[in-house]
C-alpha cells in the first residue's frame, strides 16, 4: 500500500473522519456500478441505511406472496449504499437492474460489480436477447465487469470445478459427467453399471434452484424408460449434465447442507440449510461438524483462488459460497459423511440474516479494498476509462485513508503496552 506523503502530512483526524479530496477534483468520483436484484436476500432487521432510496425498496414484500424471506431492504443495494457512506467523496454507486445494463452505461462506470443479473439469470427469466447483451459485456474486459468471464465460466460449468476438486482429492458425490448431451439409453446403462438403485440427474451448466432435474428408482426406468426419453427430448438444448446417486439421509430425506461463505478469500460464516424444510435455516452452531465443513470448504476455496483473476493475475474473490452436503453416518468418526455439493459465485444468496455480523458492512469494506486494487491493475493495463488521471488521484486519497486507518488500529492495539 502506498501512502501519499502530501496527504499524510494533513492532520490525521481530518483524513480519518472523511476522505479528503485534493483540490481540483471537483465533484468527480469513482463510479461503481452495482447490478442488483437479490429481492429474496434481505439484510438483518434494523441495519438498513437511513437514506435507503425509495425506488430501490422492495415494496409490499410481505406475507405469502413475498419473494424469498420478504422485506424491503436487500443485501446487494445495502452494500453499495454502505460503500458510499464509507467514502462519500470517493465513490458514486450506479445501481441498475440487469435490464438496464448497456455497453454505454458500463463504459461510464469505472467498475461494475454484478451481484445479481448475469447471463444465466437472464436465460432463467426467458430473456435471450438480454442474455446475449450481457454475455457480450461480461466477455469483454474493457467494460470492467466483475466477475471476469473465465472465472465465471469455470464456476457455472459444474463439471469444470468438480473435476478440479476431484483432482485435488476433495470428496464429492460420485458423478457421471455428461458433456455432449443427454442420451437416455446410454445414461441408464451407465447408472446400472454403477449399481445405483436410485439416481438424480441435473443440468451442469447455468442451472440453479434445482431447475431441470429428474430422479427416481433405477428399476422403474429399466421397466419403463419412457420418462427418461421424455427428459432427453425436453433437454435437447442442454449439453452438460451430472448424473449422481440419489443422496438420502438414513431417514429417507434429501441431504442437508452447511453453506460456507468466503469474503475476500477468507472463511467468514456458515449457515445450515435443511434439505427439505424451507424454513430450516440457521447459523451453524459451533462444534466438530462446523469445523470439519469449514476445513473442507477452505480446501475447496484453494481451487477457486487458482482461477479468480483480474487483469490476468490472481485476486481474492469478493464472495463465494461453498455448499457442503452432510449425511448422518455412524461409520464415520465425525458421525457424518461430508462432501462438496456446489460452489457458488457472488451471484448467489448471501443469507446475511443468519450471519454473525452485518453482511453489507463487511462486503462494502471488501468492495472498497478490491475496487482500489482492480482499478490500479486496469489503469496499469491501460484500459480505456473515464478520466484515468483523476481516478489515480482519488485512489491515492483512498490509500492514505486506509494507511491512516490501519495506523490508528495499530495504535489502539499497541497503546496498552506502550503506557506500561
Ligand atoms: N445427488 C443428489 N441426490 C439427491 N438430491 C440432490 C442431489 N443433487 C442435488 N440434489 C437436490 O437438489 C437441490 C439442487 O441441487 P444443487 O444444489 O446441486 O444444484 P442447483 O440447482 O445449482 O441448486 P441451488 O438451488 O442451490 O442453486 C439440492 O439442494 C438437493 O436438495
Ligand atoms: Mg445448491
Image (tube, grey):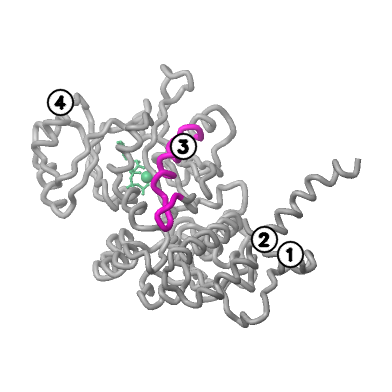
| Residue located at (35% from left, 48% from top) | 155
Q: How crowded is mark 4: few (under 14 residues within 10 Å), some or many (20 or more)?
A: few
According to the picture, the residue beneath numbered tag 4 turns out to be 193
According to the picture, the residue beneath numbered tag 3 turns out to be 297
Above or below for 387 versus 288: below
203 displayed left or right of 105: left
121 displayed left or right of 224: right
Give the label, 3 or 4, closer to the camera.
Answer: 3
Residue in the foreground of this view, choosing between 127 and 31: 31
- Quadrant in the picture for residue 124: bottom left
Residue 235 seen in render: yes
Disc 2 to disc 1, how far (Cα)?
Answer: 7 Å
Q: Which one is earlier in the sequence, the residue at label 4 or at label 1?
A: 1
| Residue located at (24% from left, 67% from top) | 128
From the top left corner, tell me how far across and down residue 420 is, in percent.
Answer: 91, 40
Disc 3 to disc 2, how far (Cα)?
Answer: 35 Å
Q: Main secondary structure of the magenta part?
A: helix
The magenta segment: 294-314
Is 309 contained in the magenta span?
yes
Q: How crowded is mark 1: few (under 14 residues within 10 Å), some or many (20 or more)?
A: some
The answer to whether mark 1 is within 8 Å of ligand 1 is no
According to the picture, the residue beneath numbered tag 1 turns out to be 8
From the top left corner, tell me how far across and down residue 261 is, in percent.
Answer: 50, 45
Amino acid at each position: 500500500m502506498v501512502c501519499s506523503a502530501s496527504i499524510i502530512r494533513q492532520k490525521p483526524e481530518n483524513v480519518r473522519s472523511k476522505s479528503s479530496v485534493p483540490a481540483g477534483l471537483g465533484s468527480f468520483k469513482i463510479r461503481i456500478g452495482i447490478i442488483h436484484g437479490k429481492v429474496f436476500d434481505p439484510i438483518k432487521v434494523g441495519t438498513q441505511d437511513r437514506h435507503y432510496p425509495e425506488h430501490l425498496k422492495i415494496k409490499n414484500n410481505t406475507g405469502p406472496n413475498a419473494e424469498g424471506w420478504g422485506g424491503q431492504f436487500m443485501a446487494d443495494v445495502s452494500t453499495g449504499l454502505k460503500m458510499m457512506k464509507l467514502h462519500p467523496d470517493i465513490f458514486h454507486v450506479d445501481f441498475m437492474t440487469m435490464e438496464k445494463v448497456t455497453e454505454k452505461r458500463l463504459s461510464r462506470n469505472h467498475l461494475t460489480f454484478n451481484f445479481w443479473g448475469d447471463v444465466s439469470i437472464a436465460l432463467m427469466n426467458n430473456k435471450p436477447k438480454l442474455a446475449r447483451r450481457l454475455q457480450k459485456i461480461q466477455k469483454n474486459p474493457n467494460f470492467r465487469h466483475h466477475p471476469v468471464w473465465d472465472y465465471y465460466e469455470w464456476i457455472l460449468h459444474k463439471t469444470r470445478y468438480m473435476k478440479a476438486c476431484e483432482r485435488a482429492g476433495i470428496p464429492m458425490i460420485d458423478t457421471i459427467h455428461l458433456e455432449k448431451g443427454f442420451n437416455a439409453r446410454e445414461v441408464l446403462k451407465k447408472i446400472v453399471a454403477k449399481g445405483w438403485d436410485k439416481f438424480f440427474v441435473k443440468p451442469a451448466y447455468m442451472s440453479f434452484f434445482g431447475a431441470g432435474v429428474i430422479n427416481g428408482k433405477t428399476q422403474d426406468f429399466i421397466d419403463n424408460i419412457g420418462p427418461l426419453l421424455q427428459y432427453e427430448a425436453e433437454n435437447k438444448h442442454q449439453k452438460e449434465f451430472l448424473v449422481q446417486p440419489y443422496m438420502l439421509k438414513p431417514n429417507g430425506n434429501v441431504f442437508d447442507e452447511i453453506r460456507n461463505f468466503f469474503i475476500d478469500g477468507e472463511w467468514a460464516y456458515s449457515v445450515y440449510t435443511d434439505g427439505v424444510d424451507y424454513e430450516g435455516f440457521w447459523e451453524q452452531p459451533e462444534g466438530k461438524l462446523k469445523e470439519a465443513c469449514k476445513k473442507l470448504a477452505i480446501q475447496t476455496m484453494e481451487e477457486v483462488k487458482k482461477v479468480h483473476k483480474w487483469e490476468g493475475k490472481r485476486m481474492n474473490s469478493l464472495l463465494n459460497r461453498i455448499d457442503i452436503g452432510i449425511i448422518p453416518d455412524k461409520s464415520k468418526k465425525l458421525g457424518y459423511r461430508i462432501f462438496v455439493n456446489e460452489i457458488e459465485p457472488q451471484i448467489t444468496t448471501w443469507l446475511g440474516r443468519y450471519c454473525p455480523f452485518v453482511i453489507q458492512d463487511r462486503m462494502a469494506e471488501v468492495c472498497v479494498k478490491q475496487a482500489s486494487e482492480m482499478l490500479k491493475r486496469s489503469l496499469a493495463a491501460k484500459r480505456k476509462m473515464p478520466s484515468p488521471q483523476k481516478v489515480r488521484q482519488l485512489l491515492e486519497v483512498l490509500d492514505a485513508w486506509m494507511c491512516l486507518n490501519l495506523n490508528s488500529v495499530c495504535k489502539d492495539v499497541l497503546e496498552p503496552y506502550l503506557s506500561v
